[in-house]
Image (cartoon, grey):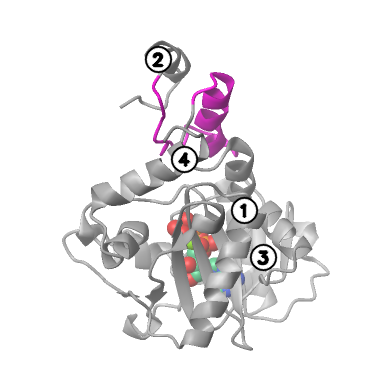
Amino acid sequence: MVEANNDSFLKLKELKPDIVFNFAEGLSGFNRESQIPALLEMLQLPYSGSDALTLGICLDKSRAKEILTYHKISNAKFLVANRMEDIKNSSFDFPLIVKPISEGSSKGIFSSSFVKNKKELEDEVQRILSSYNQPALIEEFLPGREFTVAIIGNDDDANVLPIIEILYEDFPEDVVPLYSYEAKWILDTKENSFDVFECPAKINSKLEAEIKETVLRTYNVLRCKDWSRIDVRLDKKGIPNIIEINPLPGIMPDPNENSSFPKAARVAGMTYNQMIQNVLYSAAKRYDLL
Ligand SMILES: Nc1ncnc2c1ncn2[C@@H]1O[C@H](COP(=O)(O)OP(=O)(O)OP(=O)(O)O)[C@@H](O)[C@H]1O
Ligand SMILES: [Mg+2]
């Protein structure tokens, strides 16, 4: 284990590992997840997962959405607000969702992030700008079913693991149908599991094929490597839209923690260790180490 801190460069230089399993979230800043991969690239050490560029792009949800839009991959219409003036003339249809542009684990996403009118929109944008010290991302709300999809491998060997659905019918009535901070961390604790996942999702083969095609195209267009978890929600016409791409997915080992990637791997018949090894082997193969 090498701690991802200011000493990592010299430690890795000395250790010269054959390959690194990277799951460093980084310390701070908008490019935090890119920091260790950039050091590893400089030291010419092979490592698992996406490179600094892909990690940096996906952490900025608006940059990732711009690329998806260029490649005609469906995603919610959006606007970035750097200041309050930026929403003055916005002409989106309510409801909308307002989120910090570069966070994960639902930080900054609460039931109040679902906004139904101009006043709520202003309040939420103000909250993000002042509390999170970063632009607010405003998106049209996708009202349909929500899925999260884990992928392992590269190119023709990229495999979609069993699709997970987030079941909103199990949510308490006063909680908005969002996989929000409340849902992930307050209602769901290790001691008191709030399991709203269904895996494999109960979907027909047409929808399954559409979701798989959309997430694999997204994975390739963003040049994800070895693994990722991609969040998807259906729009009002039932078309799968990309919510966001997690090229460095959370992998909490305890099943009671309800971490999605290990859950999909378990349903695919992998143990936790096999899951890690499959990701690592994908990387080793990519570097021609096998
Ligand atoms: N445009 C949208 N329409 C509908 N729901 C949305 C939209 N954007 C986000 N959500 C809801 O908010 C949740 C969190 O959003 P998002 O995945 O962008 O945040 P995150 O903090 O990066 O998540 P993660 O924990 O996966 O890193 C989604 O799972 C979804 O329920
Ligand atoms: Mg998400």
Circle 2 Cα neighbour tier, 10 Å, few/some/many (<14 / 14–19 / ≥20): few
Q: Earlier in the sequence, mark 4 or mark 3?
A: 3
**What's drawn in magenta, residue-wise?**
17-45
288 to the left or right of 82: left
Q: Label 3 is placed on what type of residue?
A: Ile
Circle 1 Cα neighbour tier, 10 Å, few/some/many (<14 / 14–19 / ≥20): many
Helix, strand or loop at mark 3: strand
Q: Up-down: is 214 above or below 169? A: above
Mark 1 vs mark 2, foreground winner is: 2
Give the spatial CA distance, label 1 vs label 4: 34 Å
Give the spatial CA distance, label 3 vs label 2: 41 Å
Helix, strand or loop at mark 4: helix
Q: Label 1 is placed on what type of residue?
A: Ile
What x and y, as percent, mark residue 208? Answer: 49, 80
Q: Earlier in the sequence, mark 1 or mark 2?
A: 2
Q: Earlier in the sequence, mark 1 or mark 3?
A: 1
Q: Nearer the viewer, residue 211 or 129?
A: 211
Please report the residue visible at 51 percent of the width from the left and 65 percent of the height from the top.
231
Quarter of the figure that contains the C terminus: top left
Quarter of the figure that contains the N terminus: top left
